[in-house]
């Protein structure tokens, strides 16, 4: 039976998917809604995992689910199962939203939650997994959450540090090769008219190295280096890789040549697509070829618990978001966020590599719990086909198609004050972030970080630079 090892999944298939998610992230839309995205992705994922895991464990205690189907440590395995299932994969939904006339805020929240949710679910999964060696119980839950935050923050620091180091190197590399002085130092004859070059110079240029290859190599190897450093440091390589992708796209991407920019972006997109395609193909093959272990308690409870745990996190998270958010999210938006919580490749990949707590004949730790794999396969296939195919009709039913962000915020304001007869015009609602912290970071980034690590030059900066170059040339 075809089966990939944990090393193949976590070191070969998952990194390209996660890095591409961070590298292609629309940062402005993401950070404009960072409060809502973090609430759904971090707090919501934890609530969903705990709800699913606790519900499953109660059924184990009631013997509706056989304890033998949950491995050697049912309590820990139930919560690991919950952490894996809390990983959403709304690929089908995002494809429909991208092609439909939907509010930008809806797409941004769904996409933002999905890219962070996978990283959080994986960290939570590994935090529980690391506690399997000890007697995992209710008393060890605080230690698990402490380790969870340690992994999350530590991975952020590692990913940021490695990405900034690569950006600094690429900026120096770019300055060296864009400076004509280094050609003359290498024995080239400088052109007097700035257009023609001597035969000697042309010969040396043909013999010289192509900087595009080196630029691409630094970005690609630097991104994977963040993953390896984080794993060696005992933090999460996946989270480090995601934030490394964000910083690479913000700084490193603008320090390389145009050819390297196009090549790197396409390479990451194709690599992520192929890895995700392989995992989905593997998931489909398992339906037909896998020797399924059936536990009807797990099979019958999986989909209701997946839907219920999603609802259990959407309602309190939306209430919390609306409590502190100026532009409220309406009820129909909350219902749509509930419906897009599909389970897919990452959830199944985690479950396939779940430790069973039993030793093999050669002394190695057993991997995989067949009954949980079958239940997860059913959840992933059913949610992707059923919920994914109903995205379009559901958008129309909830009256979200063709709406602008301002109309969404108007509806949210009316939902928050149903007894009020006063209405507000669309112009009174802000669709962009007004966070002072965000604005201060942009100012700090432009004045302090970009001169060191590079990055995109804004139009007003380009004007200043061009005027400076003119003055230098005239001098």
Image (cartoon, rainbow, N blue to C red):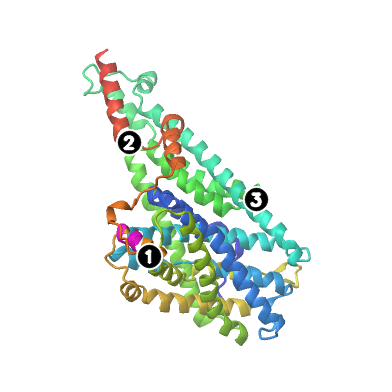
Magenta residues, start to end: 406-411
Q: Main secondary structure of the magenta part?
A: helix
Task: State if disc 1 and disc 2 touch (CB < 8 Å).
Answer: no
Q: CA distance from mark 1 to mark 3?
A: 31 Å
Q: Earlier in the sequence, mark 1 or mark 3?
A: 1
Q: Which mark is residue 185?
A: none
Bin the neighbour count of mark 2 within 10 Å (Cα to Cα): few under 14, some 14-19, many 20 and up.
few
Which residue lies most toward the top here? 475
* Residue 309 shows up from this direction: yes
Q: CA distance from mark 2 to mark 3?
A: 36 Å
Choose between 262 and 254: the one closer to the eye.
254
Residue denoted by label 3: 150
- The secondary element bearing badge 2 is classed as loop
Q: Earlier in the sequence, mark 2 or mark 1?
A: 1
Q: Quadrant of residue 373?
A: bottom right
Choose between 247 and 222: the one closer to the eye.
247
Horizontal and vertical percent for residue 144? 69, 59
Magenta segment: does it hold 410? Answer: yes
Which residue lies most toward the right here? 135
Q: Which mark is residue 94?
A: 1
Q: Quadrant of the N terminus?
A: bottom right
Choose between 27 and 168: the one closer to the eye.
27
> Viewed as shown, does residue 427 lie left or right of 376?
left
Residue denoted by label 2: 458
Bin the neighbour count of mark 3 within 10 Å (Cα to Cα): few under 14, some 14-19, many 20 and up.
some
Q: CA distance from mark 2 to mark 1?
A: 30 Å
């Amino acid at each position: 039976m075809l089966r990939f090892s944990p090393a193949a999944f976590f070191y070969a298939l998952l990194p390209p998917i996660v890095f591409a998610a961070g590298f292609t992230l629309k940062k402005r839309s993401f950070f404009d809604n960072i409060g809502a995205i973090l609430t759904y992705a971090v707090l919501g994922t934890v609530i969903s995992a705990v709800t699913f895991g606790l519900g499953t464990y109660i059924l184990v205690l009631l013997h509706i689910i056989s304890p033998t189907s949950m491995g050697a440590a049912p309590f820990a395995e139930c919560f690991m199962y919950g952490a894996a299932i809390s990983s959403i994969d709304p690929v089908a939904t995002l494809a429909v939203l991208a092609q439909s006339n939907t509010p930008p805020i809806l797409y941004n929240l769904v996409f933002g939650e999905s890219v962070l949710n996978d990283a959080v679910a994986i960290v939570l999964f590994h935090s529980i997994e690391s506690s399997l060696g000890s007697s995992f119980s209710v008393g060890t839950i605080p230690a698990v959450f402490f380790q969870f935050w340690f992994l999350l923050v530590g991975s952020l620091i590692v990913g940021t540090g490695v990405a900034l180091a690569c950006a600094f190197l690429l900026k120096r590399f770019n300055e060296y090769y864009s400076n004509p002085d280094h050609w003359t130092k290498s024995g080239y004859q400088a052109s007097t008219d700035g257009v023609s070059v001597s035969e000697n110079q042309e010969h040396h240029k043909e013999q010289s190295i192509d900087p595009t290859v080196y630029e691409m190599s630094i970005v690609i190897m630097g991104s994977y280096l963040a993953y390896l450093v984080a794993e060696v440091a005992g933090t999460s390589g996946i989270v480090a890789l995601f934030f490394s992708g964000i910083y690479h796209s913000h700084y490193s991407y603008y320090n390389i040549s145009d050819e390297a920019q196009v090549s790197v972006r396409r390479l990451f997109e194709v690599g992520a697509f192929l890895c995700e395609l392989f995992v989905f193909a593997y998931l489909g093959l398992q339906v037909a070829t896998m020797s399924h272990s059936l536990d009807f308690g797990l099979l019958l409870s999986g989909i209701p618990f997946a839907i219920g745990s999603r609802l259990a996190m959407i309602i309190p998270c939306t209430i919390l978001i609306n409590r502190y958010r100026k532009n409220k999210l309406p009820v129909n938006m909350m219902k749509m966020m509930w419906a897009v919580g599909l389970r897919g490749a990452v959830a199944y990949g985690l479950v396939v590599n779940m430790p069973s707590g039993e030793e093999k004949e050669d002394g190695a730790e057993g991997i995989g719990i067949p009954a949980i794999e079958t239940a997860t396969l059913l959840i992933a296939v059913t949610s992707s086909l059923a919920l994914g195919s109903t995205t379009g009709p559901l958008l129309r039913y909830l009256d979200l198609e063709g709406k602008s962000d301002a109309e969404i915020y108007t509806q949210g304001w009316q939902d928050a004050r149903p007894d009020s007869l006063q209405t507000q015009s669309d112009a009174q609602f802000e669709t962009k972030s007004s966070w002072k912290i965000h604005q201060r970071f942009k100012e700090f980034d432009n004045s302090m970080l970009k001169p060191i690590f590079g990055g995109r030059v804004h139009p007003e900066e380009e004007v200043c630079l061009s005027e400076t170059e003119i003055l230098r040339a005239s001098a």
